[in-house]
Amino acid sequence: MTESSWRMPRWFHQMGSPKWFYGFAGILQPWFAIAALGLLTWGAVWGLAFAPADYQQGNSFRIMYVHVPAAILSQSIFLGMAVAGAVGLVWKMKVAFMVARSCIAIGATFTAIALVTGAIWGKPTWGAYWVWDARLTSTLVLFFLYAGIMALNQAISERHIAGKATAILAIVGTINIPIIKYSVEWWNTLHQSSSFTLTAKPSMPAEMYLPLLLTVLGSYCFFALVVLMRTRSQIVQSQSGASWLMQHRDITGA
Amino acid sequence: MIRFMWAIVRRDLLLVARQPAEMINPLVFFLLVIALFPLGVSPEAALLSQTAAGVIWVAAMLATLLSLELLFKLDHDDGSLEQLLLAPYPSWSLVLAKVFVHWLVSGLPLILISPLIATMLFLPSQAVPTLMLSLLIGTPTLSLLGAIGAALVTGVRGGGMLLTLLILPLYVPVIIFGASSVAAAAQGMAIGGYMALLAAMFVFALMITPWAAGSALKL
C-alpha cells in the first residue's frame, strides 16, 4: 500500500481556521460589495430602461431581471450550502458549518423573491398568478426545504450540532432536488423552457441578454457578500473572548 | 451484524406487541383522514373515484409521518439508543433494522387495509392491485426517508411538527408516481414505468438514507 501523495492544498486547511477565515473574508468583503453594487446597478438600469421591449410580452418581461437571478441563486445557494456542509462533515471544519448556516436565510429569501416575482410575471403572461407547473412546483418545494432547514436550526440550540444537522439535511435535499425536479416535470409542465444557459447560444438578443447576465453576476456577488458577513458574525459570536479576535483591527478600530 | 439487526427487530416487535396502540393509532388516523374527504369535498361516486388515488396516498403519507416521530424517541428517552450506538456495529444497521420494524408496523397494515378504503372511495376495481403494489413499493421509501427526519429531531423539543416540515418535501416524488400509477391503472393504462420508478426510488433511498440517518443519530 502506497500512501496517496495527493493532499488538499494548504489554503484549503487555512480556510478552516476561524482566525484566518475572518481576516480573509474581511479583505474580500469590500470587493464583493463594490462588484455587487456596480453590476446590479448597471444591469438593472440597462435592463429596465434601455433594453428593447419584448415583441410578445411588451414591458412586462423586464421583471425577468429580478426573477431569473433570484431563481438561479435559489438553487445555487442550496448546492453551495450542501457543498459547505459536506466539507464540514468530511474535514470537520467548524467554519464550513458556519458558511452552510449563513446560506439558509439568504437562499430562502431568493427563493421567495423568485416565487413572488414569478407570480407577478405569470399574471400578464399566462393569465394566472399561480399554476401547478413543474418549475413553479419544484421551486415551491425548494422553499419548503429551506423552511425545514431553518426550522431545524431554530429548534437546535447548540450551534455545533445545528451546523451538522444543516449539513446532513442540505446534502439529502441536494440529492433529492433533481429527483423532485424531474418527477414534477413528468407530472405537469407549462413553463417556458429556460432561455438562459451557459452552453447554448441565447435565444434572445444581446441587448436583453447581457443585462440579465450582469444582474445574475451581481446577485452572486451580493450572495457572497452576505455569506461572508454572516459567517464573520458567527465567528465573532463563537470566538468572543479569543485574544486574536480582541486584537483584530476590526474590533479595536485601529 | 445480521444477528445484531435481528435482535433489534425482535426487540422492537416485542415492544410494539406490548403496546398495540402504537400500531393501531396510525391506522385509525389513516381511516379518519380518508373519511374526512367525502365529508368535506363531496360524497359523489364520480368525483371520489377520480380523487381516490391521491387521497389514499396523501393519507398514507400522513399516517407514516405520525408514527415516525416515535422511531428513535423512546429509545433516546430511556437511554438505550446511546448504548445501541456504542455497539460495535455501524449505525446504519441500527437504522435499517428500526426502519424495517416501522414499515412492518405502520406500512404493512395500510397496504392490507387499502382495498377496503379503495371500495369506500369508489376506486375502479381494476386499479386496486396497482394501489396495493404501489403502496408496497412506496411505503418502505416513505419509512426510509422519514428515518432521516426522525433521527435529526430526536431529542429536539416539538420534534413531531418539525419532522413533518423536514420530510414532506422529500415525499413529493413518491406521491407523484404512487398516485399517478393508480390513476393510470384506473384508466386501464400500463403501469410498468411507474412501478419501475417507484422501485428505483426505493433502491436509491435504501442506499442513502441509512447512512444519513445513522450520522444524524450520532450528532
Image (cartoon, rainbow, N blue to C red):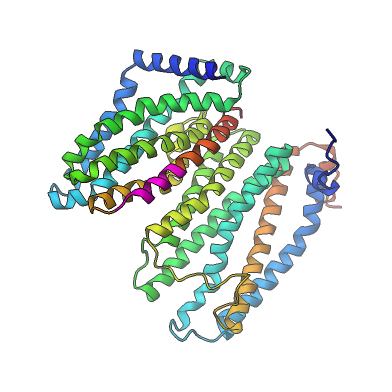
Quadrant that contains the N terminus of chain A: top right
Pick whichever, A242 or B95, lies toward us.
Answer: B95
Q: Residue at position x 70%, y 72% from top?
A: A38
Q: Position of residue B198 (x, y in %)?
A: 41, 44
Spot occupied by residue A188 in the image (x, y as percentages of width and height): 37, 61
A172 versus B82 height, above or below = below
Q: Where is residue A202 in the image (x, y as percent from the top left)?
A: 58, 77
Residue drawn where x is 57% and y is 35% of the image: B212
Looking at the image, is A13 positioned above or below residue B217? below
Asked which quadrant contains residue B39, the reply is top left
B185 to B91, vertically: above or below: below
Q: Is residue B195 left or right of residue A85?
A: left
Q: Quadrant location of residue A126? A: bottom left
Helix, strand or loop for the magenta stretch, by majority: helix
- Residue B199: in magenta span: yes
Please check the rendered image and state whether residue B153 is part of the magenta-colored stretch, yes or no. Answer: no
- Residue A201 spot, x, y in % from top left: 60, 77
For the point 63% across and 45% down, the residue is A101
Q: In this view, does A23 lie to the left or right of A124?
A: right
Magenta stretch bounds: B190-200
Q: Is residue A171 above or below residue B13?
A: below
Residue A56 visible in rendering: yes
